[in-house]
Amino acid sequence: MRWLPDIYSSSPSEILRIQGDLLQETISRAMRASPFYRERLSACMDATTVRTVADLACLPFTSREEIQGRNRDFWAAPRDRLREIVATTGTTGVPIYVAMTHADLERLGENEHRGFSWLGAKPGDLFHIAITLDNLFVAGLAYHLGLQKVGATTVRVGAQPARRHLDLMKQLRPSGMVAVPSLLLALARQSKKDGEEPAAFAPRRAMLIGDAIRSQSLTSNTLGSLLETAWGGELYSTYGLTEAGLAFHECPLHQGLHSHPDLVITEVVDDAGRAVRDGEIGELVITTLQVEGMPLIRYRTGDVTFRVPGDCPCGRGGARIGPILGRKQHRLKVKGTTLYPKSIEDALLTVDGVENFVIEAHTGDDETDRLVVRVGTLRNDPGFRTLVGEALHARARVTPEIHLAQPGAVEQLLFEGGRRKPRVFVDLRRSRGASG
């Protein structure tokens, strides 16, 4: 494997040349060792002529459904070379099992090493990891490996009650942490409830996984603004893909999520699979580079974003993407309004008293989408439901059915079936089936 940590300072033409070389290696490995790609690419007359990133357009896409249906046929390394099996959460159907070799684990750690380095992590730092390392979850493993490469000390806390996290921070005084945004917000609220000020003992740097904290304009969205007010410090957003064994990271200027050009090639396409211009919204497509266990070629992620146009002011080259705006399959059409569940989430976060929530999409009598929002709250004043409805109408331009419940009841819905990640959006539309 050839890690190229200085690739960001290369010229655009040099980055494309390097990616072209690595792409040829990826295609060769996939055709030689992956039963799926051997079959798929052997039937493609142009596969052996691919020499550059531009040539990728002649190759077929890979879908999530194809991996779910033929998972083991995507594995491209013999069993005696595998060192780890990780899996997606299964929130969009059958989990995908990803085989990783020793080199893939090194790549995973290298990817996060770069992200942590941009955040300013260094030897002697202590990082509080509030992400689980068990149950085949790759993210916690990735962060642990990345911090080990940095030379920092890790505190592997995982999923614990808010009070446990805060007590450990008071005792160990970490200089950084890794968490999902919702946990960070819960910690800030718990600290306030207990009469404590997080800034007195909590880390001032946080790498956040999961929900986006930036808007399409790359400024802080509702969740990001709430965290900046409640938590403070500097927050770095990331976007990761278990299937690809990689993540995109913000630099200190927070102007989009940088790809790592020697590890991945990015495309953004429209519904018909045609490339869209930088700045235009479409579906993210990725091709992994330097992967042994399960290489992916033109994988349609199902995530909606855009390539950030122009160069990053930080001077790092390579593609950048914007925040994930939603899942393509979760696109909603309500009374002529097209939106993603994220818009509803942002609106709910502005309402004081909303502790948690679940958004359900149903098929209405007129075959359009019908929304039901189940809000967990401790408020029982008669005007609260109206307040929630007004916020949804003003910010998301929708008026869903609103059901109020105790936070504990909504919490059960979020983690129903023993889920390891909360399911905020539940798709119950007849044409799409239950997913989310």
Image (cartoon, helix red, strand yellow):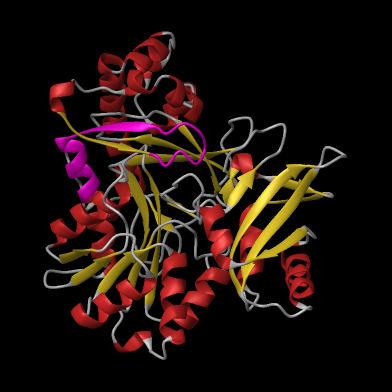
Question: In the shown orientation, is residue 41 left or right of residue 359?
Answer: left
Q: Is residue 387 visible?
A: yes
Toward the viewer: 182 or 259? Answer: 182
Reply yes or no: does residue 101 show up in magenta.
yes
Toward the viewer: 389 or 105? Answer: 389
- Percent of width and height locating residue 99: 26, 31
Magenta span: 88-109
In percent of the image, x 41 and y 75: which residue is there? 187
Which image quadrant: the N terminus? top left
Q: Please tell me in which quadrant of the rendered image residue 82 appears.
A: top left
Q: Please tell me in which quadrant of the rendered image residue 271 appears.
A: top right
In percent of the image, x 53 and y 51: which residue is there? 423
- Percent of width and height locating residue 114: 25, 57
- Percent of width and height locating residue 391: 73, 71
Which image quadrant: the C terminus? top right
Q: Please tell me in which quadrant of the rendered image residue 362 appears.
A: top right
